[in-house]
Amino acid sequence: MSVFLLPLKLCDELNNLCAKFWWGQVGNERKIHRKSWDKLSTSKKEGGMGFRDLRAFNLAMLAKQGWRMIQGNDSLLHKCFKARYFPRSSFIDAKESPGCSHIWRSLVAALPILKVGYCWRVGNGSSIQSAYKVARRIQGEDRAESLVSSASTKIWHVLWNLKIPNKIKVFGWRACIDILPTRANLVRRRVLTDDKCPICLRESENTIHAIWECAAVQDIWAGSCRKLQKRCSGVADVMQLMECLCDRLTRKELELFWVQAWLAWNQRNRVVFGGNLMDPRNLNNRAAVYLTDYRQAQEQLTMTWTEHQCIETWQPPPSSAFKLNFDAVILADMDRIGVGAIIRN
Ligand SMILES: [Zn+2]
């Protein structure tokens, strides 16, 4: 991947596999992909999930090789390529020629990135990210609208930095970009024909209704922290709601809000399949207990990790030697053993 340009079709297929995995699609089963891979590949601070787009990553790795070519004028590789492909110009101005090798074609494909980021350092590992950003930007020039707006940047920053389980953050992200499977969204996708809220049976069940305005959730918010009781009125969607809540609530209050919203959403789905509505006080208590347990578990994990780090750190062997690390486990109840080994220089 760092030497050859992968075929576009292969990149698309691999991206598609990742997308299927993300949306929980197994085999030939059909699942709705509620956002394109392109948008999921946008960084988290811009409203995406920050997944790597393989084509852009491939080009970024090639740009690193290209940068080596620029730096290493005396290298054998540079001399060979210069003699063959750009005898009278510099590498940065070189072009693809008919019948050229695949390696050369790959390097030339990454030249636009080098030209844009010429003043940046691409030499070390960390700057591959910069090249990746340039590659995405170049790709983005002919792409559809981005999820970014200056007002939303703060919301994404706050949401992704909350100390709540990732599944709840992803739930929050899905609510913000309006891809939860609400009835309104399912009608839009022609899965259902009636978008009426299955609980209050009065209004259309869109995302803001499901987690903020429906009578069933209003009871939850009424019994929650005081600042939430002074409701953010007239918000059109969850992004506006988040904007309002970010100004009013502390980080911890916002964490509780999202756990409550997540429980309320799950409860809504259970009701659709015949379950009962929980007493709002019970739901709020459950949210508080859930969050306390999570925070305690995180603290313990951090402590164990710090202790662990102090005791064991892998040390590389002397330059002329190899080191073998191994471990084994006996799974008596499964009647199996497992062995793992790694040899490194
Ligand atoms: Zn409702």
Image (cartoon, helix red, strand yellow):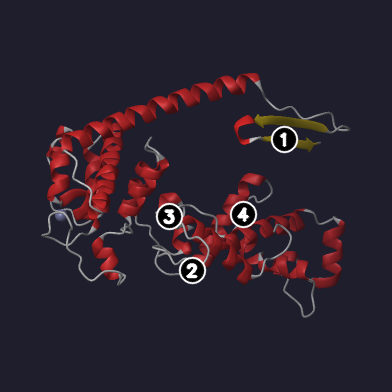
Q: Secondary structure at mark 4?
A: loop
Q: Gap in Å between the C-alphas at discs 2 and 1?
A: 49 Å
- Residue underneath mark 4: 119
Residue 315 % position (x, y): 74, 27
Residue drawn at (39%, 63%) of the image:
34
Residue drawn at (17%, 63%) of the image:
196
Which tag, 1 or 3, sits closer to the chain's start? Answer: 3
Which tag, 2 or 1, sits closer to the chain's start? Answer: 2
Which label sits in the foreground, 4 or 1?
1
Q: Amino acid at mark 3?
A: Gly
Q: Gap in Å between the C-alphas at discs 4 and 1?
A: 48 Å
Would you call the spot at circle 2 few (<14 residues within 10 Å), some (14-19), or many (20 or more)?
Answer: few
Q: Amino acid at mark 1?
A: Val
Q: Does the beta carbon of the residue at mark 2 sit less than 8 Å from ligand 1?
A: no
- Residue underneath mark 3: 48
**Among the 4 quarters of the image, the one containing residue 12:** bottom right
- Residue underneath mark 2: 141
Residue 255 % position (x, y): 31, 36
Which label sits in the foreground, 2 or 3?
3
Which tag, 4 or 1, sits closer to the chain's start? Answer: 4
- Residue underneath mark 1: 339
Which label sits in the foreground, 2 or 1?
1
- Assign ligand 1 to one image quadrant: bottom left
Q: Secondary structure at mark 3?
A: loop
**Among the 4 quarters of the image, the one containing residue 249:** top left
Above/below status of 27 relative to 317: below
- Work out which quarter of the rendered image holds the C terminus and state it: top right
Q: Gap in Å between the C-alphas at discs 2 and 3?
A: 17 Å
